[in-house]
Amino acid sequence: MSERGGAVHVVTTRRTYKGRVYETHLLRRSYRDGDRVKNETLGNLSHLPAAVIDLVRRALRGETFVPLLLYSVTFSPLVAVQMLPEPSMAIP
């Protein structure tokens, strides 16, 4: 096993076998071993939904996510959805 460190990223590979396309999503880390660049597989993300894989990929690129809450009439949080204020409520 190699030292800790190196860039973590998501790799997607596609393989065609007997007319079907198989897609694999792996969480990998790149590191150097002397003059060679090697990859270590940290996990298999293939079982996750495509939206979650996209979120992991974007988060590893440095994108920040902030939860936004939607409130009902009783002001209890329901789901994370972006709400825009009405034009009459805009701050001048």
Image (cartoon, rainbow, N blue to C red):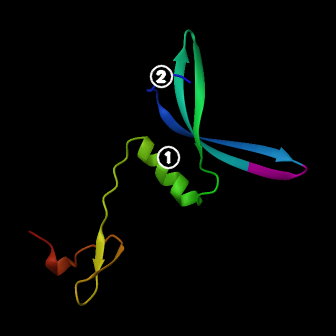
Q: Position of residue 16 (x, y in %)?
A: 82, 46
Question: Mainly helix, strand or loop, the magenta region?
Answer: strand
In the rendered structure, the answer to whether residue 35 lies left or right of residue 70 reads right
- Magenta segment: 18-22
Q: Residue at x 54, y 53 (%)?
A: 53
Residue with the mark numbered 1: 57
Task: Identify residue type, mark 1.
Answer: Arg
Q: Nearer the viewer, mark 2 or mark 1?
A: 2
Q: Position of residue 87 (x, y in %)?
A: 20, 77
Q: Position of residue 47 (x, y in %)?
A: 63, 56
Q: Is residue 78 above or below residue 13?
A: below
Q: Residue furthest bottom?
A: 73
Q: Residue at x 46, y 26 (%)?
A: 6
3 and 83: which one is in front? 3
- Quadrant housing residue 72: bottom left
Point out which mark residue 77 bears: none
Q: Residue furthest left?
A: 92
Q: Residue at x 53, y 17 (%)?
A: 32
Point out which mark residue 3 bears: 2
Q: Position of residue 49 (x, y in %)?
A: 59, 60
Q: Residues within 10 Å of mark 2 (few under 14, many from 20)?
A: few
Task: Identify residue type, mark 2.
Answer: Glu
Q: Secondary structure at mark 1?
A: helix
- Quadrant housing residue 65: bottom left
Quarter of the picture containing the N terminus is top right
